[in-house]
Image (cartoon, rainbow, N blue to C red):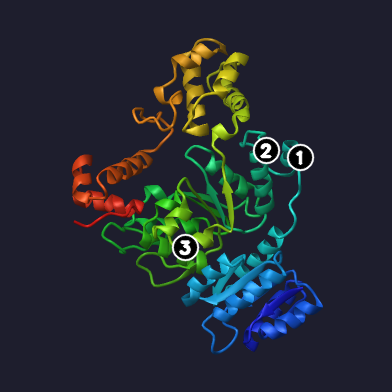
Amino acid sequence: MLLIIDDDIAIQTSLSLLFRKEGFTVRVADGPFEAFEVLDEEVPELILLDMNFSVDTSGDDGLRLLRRIRERLPNIPVILITGWGSIDLAVEGMKAGAKDFITKPWQNDHLVQAVQTALNLAQPASTSPNRRKLDQQFRFDNIVGEDPNLLDILTTIGRVSPTDAPVLITGESGTGKELIAEAIHQNSRRKRQPFVKVNLGGISSTLFESELFGHVRGAFTDAKTDRVGRFELANKGSIFLDEIGDLDPASQVKLLRVLQDRTFEPLGSSKSKTVDVRVICATNRNLEEMVSRGQFREDLFYRINLITVRLPALRERPGDIPLLVNYFVTNLKTIYNRPDLRVGPVAQKWLKNLALPGNIRQLKNVVERTVLLSSNDELQTEDFERNLTSNVTTPLHAPSSLPDVGTMTLEEMEYQMIQRAMAFHHNRVAKVARALGITRFALYRRLEKFGIPYTEE
């Protein structure tokens, strides 16, 4: 049974018809008193709660009712229905335990998807994940490892992939966030549709709208033809928004709009387009800290992280290092036509103890470089030692070493260097610009791009 709590008879009727057509049993309530009368009789599978169910309320009554429902039925998912102007109220509702929020006017397909997703995620999880069983159920071809933490992640992915739940993937650089995003898409109902990857860290704020939403001819000086944006390319499929923590505040607002309404306007056009996409985001930054510092919108944060998957660093699962090494070597046998290539057992144990701040990406780089530069078919410890750069065996915090090639992008290095310079010079822009050898204007652009706070002088 699905319980709808709303004082508007038109909304009650519309939602009742929609969900009865989808096969649900539906009951309705005008407000708290009627809602608890229903709850005394039976327990619903899910509750749709309007945040303004009386004429005089500012939404506080909705929050109070939500908290009472959560106290009584902590495991029953609640989805909030709210107007765009009360998104802040919906965020408070998410903090109070709501599973999702939908804005008015809603799209029927989107609302039904949200309900089905919440119901699927409310099902109890299977226990004791086993890699062989997981591989029989799902497509995890390119994800290597048997560490219990990884198996828990794969179990979560298996559960959420068939839904349209937005997923936020977090973890250090090189932990395999893109592979996890691809696995979510490949195990979803959208697997035959496009999977579009977007590195938001590589898109400037001035090009953001054009890249993601497209533009029409004449929208700006160099717009010679119409361009289809990434969201439209991903329609009916999935879009992977990597490095979402790098978005500037203005771009965050624009992204929130399309995630919320599923509509957008190409740059230079007045015609809205509707899009149906599954959104998967990733970042190596701490978004919760950024929210607390005012660098990332709280409403956007709650919109993208219905499910959060944290990928462990390689040092947290050292037992998987030999499996990864053998996986890389097996691929390199074919690429470099060396069928007898293998890694000696002593070298396997030695590799498990390496400090690898670049994680899987860095390990792959180390193995491939050693294969290229060694003539031995059985690679030993000394073969790897000869081809290591200094920071592989140096702790991550060592200040004197540069990151290994392939372990960090120029953008990541730039972000870290600006942060260090700002801390050293106490956020004084003029001194930081001189120390970095750039103009103040160039530094302001980068500070805005990375969302780094600064002091005006």
Q: Amino acid at mark 1?
A: Lys
Which residue is at a point 47% across and 39% down the rendered structure image? 173
Q: Quadrant of residue 250?
A: bottom left
Which badge, 1 or 2, comes first in the chain's sequence?
1
Residue at the outermost top position: 376
Q: Amino acid at mark 2?
A: Pro
Q: Work out how far the residue at label 1 is from the one at label 2, CA to CA, in angstroms.
A: 14 Å
Secondary structure, mark 2, is: helix
Horizontal arrangement in the rendering, residue 131 relative to residue 386 (left or right): right
Residue 254, disc: none
Secondary structure, mark 3, is: helix
Q: How many marks?
A: 3
Residue pointed to by mark 1: 133
Quadrant of the image for the C terminus? Answer: bottom left
Residue at the outermost right position: 41
Horizontal arrangement in the rendering, residue 438 relative to residue 394 (left or right): left
Rendering coords of residue 212 (x, y %): 43, 57
Residue pointed to by mark 3: 298
Q: Quadrant of residue 99?
A: bottom right
Secondary structure, mark 1, is: helix
Q: Is residue 157 above or below residue 120?
A: above
Rendering coords of residue 230 (x, y %): 46, 55
